[in-house]
Image (tube, rainbow, N blue to C red):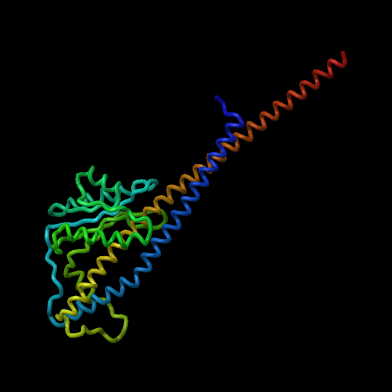
Amino acid sequence: MSDTTGSLSRKISSAGDLQSVVRTMKALAASSIGQYEKSVIALGDYYHTVELGLSAHFRESNLQSRPAIEYRDTSEIDAVVFGSDQGLVGQFNDLIADYAVETLAALPGKPAVWAVGERVHARLTDSGVVPVGLFPVPNSVQAITPLVGQIQLKSAAYRAGDGQAQLYLFHNRPKSGPLFEPVSQRLLPLDRAWREGLARLPWPTATLPEILGGGATTVAATTVAALIREYLFISLFRACAESLASENASRLAAMQRADTNIAELLETLRRDYHRLRQSGIDEELFDVISGYEALGKGDNR
């Protein structure tokens, strides 16, 4: 059945309401992206300070020919996979889940995987990697810190106090525009190459630091352990924030496409509405002219 001006008017109104919702979601996604990106940038200075503290310790250990804290490389593997629990993110969860499964399959041993998000948890389970734990996806920057604390506690408790397991992070990292890519990072163990790289880190002043009481004191060991905990916390926080920024970038791109499609639909509906309305006006004018002519002929007779 052909559309009438009334039905087209209702369709235009509905499409306009939907476009308003889409544009609101676009604004929310853009605001969220900025929020998470700013949190990562703000964390940069603190991360650099932690790196300098570890650099001072490892440099002192090298000068005194004493090994720093040693971590043995084991076949025990812990992994944290960050996903999304909200819709309109395209292949966000599939991409990171497939990447994590492929990477973990190349490693020896059976990994213990924690999933952040129910959807990526289901995707990992379907791929044969059943997570041992599930965490909710944080909905703000303030909610990331409690999540990181839960991950650290759960992973430590699962290994019954064994701090020698390998720890991998899998998350999507934002690229230019709406693009993102899956990445992984091995946080533990702290291998020799990582420690030597930190030991060579340039010191910001001409005066090199010294460890009070020497590098082997209890105070020094406690300090470096605290710095390593902060290094792990920052790495987990940044991975989560980058994942959330990528999620919102994907949603922003989806909303942008939806906004474009709705705008094109509105243009088509308005064009059809005006054409149909003009056609109705033309028909009414023809009826008036025909009636006038018919009345004129009757008067002549």
The N terminus lies in quadrant: top right
Q: Hey, which residue is sitting farthest bottom in the picture?
A: 207
Taking depth in this image into account, of 147 and 181 the one nearest to the observer is 147
**In the figure, is residue 239 to the left or right of 299?**
left
Quarter of the image holding residue 170? bottom left
Q: Hey, which residue is sitting farthest right in the picture?
A: 300
Taking depth in this image into account, of 279 and 234 the one nearest to the observer is 234
Say which residue appears at 87% left-offset and 16% top-offset: 299
The C terminus lies in quadrant: top right
- Residue 155: give x, y in percent of width and height: 20, 59
- In this rendering, the answer to whether 190 lies above or below 55 is above
- In this rendering, the answer to whether 152 lies above or below 47 is above
Say which residue appears at 18% left-offset and 85% top-offset: 213
- Residue 200: give x, y in percent of width and height: 23, 76
What number of labels is visible? 0
Say which residue appears at 37% left-offset and 53% top-offset: 247
Quarter of the image holding residue 42? bottom left
Say which residue appears at 23% left-offset and 74% top-offset: 198
- In this rendering, the answer to whether 190 lies above or below 15 is below
- Residue 23: give x, y in percent of width and height: 50, 49
Taking depth in this image into account, of 53 and 105 the one nearest to the observer is 53
